[in-house]
Image (cartoon, rainbow, N blue to C red):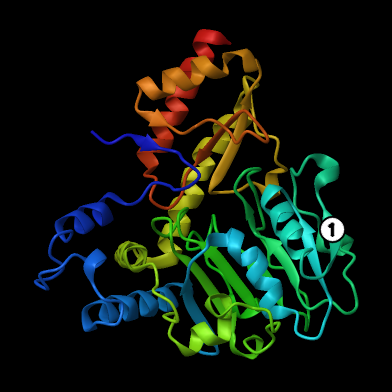
Amino acid sequence: MRIFNFSAGPAVLPEDVLRTAASEMLDWRASGMSVMEMSHRGKEFISIHEKALADLRELLAIPPNYKVLFLQGGAIAENAVVPMNLLGARTSADYVNTGEWSKKSIKEAKKYCAVNVAASAEDRSFTYVPAQATWKTSRDAAYVHVCTNETIGGVEYHWTPDTGDVPLVADMSSHILSRAVDVAKYGVIYAGAQKNMGPAGLTVVIVRDDLLDRALPITPSAFHWKEQAESDSMLNTPATYSIYVAGLVFEWLKARGGIAAIERANIAKAALLYDYLDRTEFYRNPVQREDRSRMNVPFKLRDESLDEAFLKGAKERGMVQLKGHRVVGGMRASIYNAMPVEGVRTLVDYMQEFEQRHG
């Protein structure tokens, strides 16, 4: 019996995807090989790669003047790769600090350029997104960087910043494919796959064509977007199996009705949990309501001495990975695309039961 896995990443995958991957493990479509054994330059894997690429472009309605790269290293690597590829002749970049992942991006970028923190939510413990009217951007920034969903703090942008002619760069690791995105408003979008797209090992980068030729001379070839684009993301051996499973996830999303359908489902799941949190004083969510994440819902028990009992009871009922990140403590329910509504209902029912026994 499968459990309800609320992990923030690596995270739950659709059961249909796992069953397909299992059925094709030893022999992918009469090829006589597992995908893990295939040459990345063989016709079998090339067909997998091309289909995944086409499906992702369709799902996100990616304009033709954008390249889609299937890379490695996760969002952590992209924190360095972004400045290396975008600084060009400039020496500074603007960053908006909305939490722990923003802080990691800022720390890494400082190795390559002067970082101007245009706005920060640290004054209220990273529980909101600073309004753009408060941002203090610099005149000569090479780009503006945001993390549009903070996995740890549960803060999400529900609007798209307008940065004019300055490229907008977004780390969308934990909510990509969960909602409609106007890709044309961004210069670069990047995301690790292990939260909402597939298994760990794959990093997706979506970059506008005119930004491909700004890399610093020190940029390694494997992380050079232009070189990777010219090599169809195969300058080095790509994360073949992760690409294959991500492709199955893309097919699953299309079969469910695409981004519009999954966004409706995500809105309903998040509302189910937040509505309960707003009705009780036994638990609390600290995030400003209009900035609450649909994907990652942190909450704390009023009496934190009950945390271990709460987690133990949840595990006994088939729910795991609800412990909050060590930085913020408490609890966190990550309810990505693949989390069924039954999982959220089970969690809410348990939270109510636990409150009745301990409240």
Residue at the image position 25 percent from the left and 64 percent from the top: 36
Q: Indicate left or right for 318 with 161 as reference.
A: left
Residue kind at label 1, given as amino acid type:
Ala
Give the x, y percent position of residue 258: 39, 67
Is the N terminus in the top left, top right, bottom left or bottom right quadrant? top left
Q: Indicate left or right for 307 with 319 as reference.
A: right
Q: In which quarter of the image is residue 302?
A: top right
Q: In which quarter of the image is residue 201?
A: bottom left
Q: Indicate left or right for 54 with 64 as reference.
A: left
Seen in the picture, residue 281 relative to 160 is either above or below; the reply is above
Q: Is residue 62 visible?
A: no
Q: Can residue 106 be seen in this view?
A: yes
Give the x, y percent position of residue 336: 46, 49
Residue at the image position 46 percent from the left and 17 percent from the top: 353
Q: Indicate left or right for 217 with 60 as reference.
A: right
Residue carrying label 1: 119
Residue at the image position 22 percent from the left and 67 percent from the top: 37
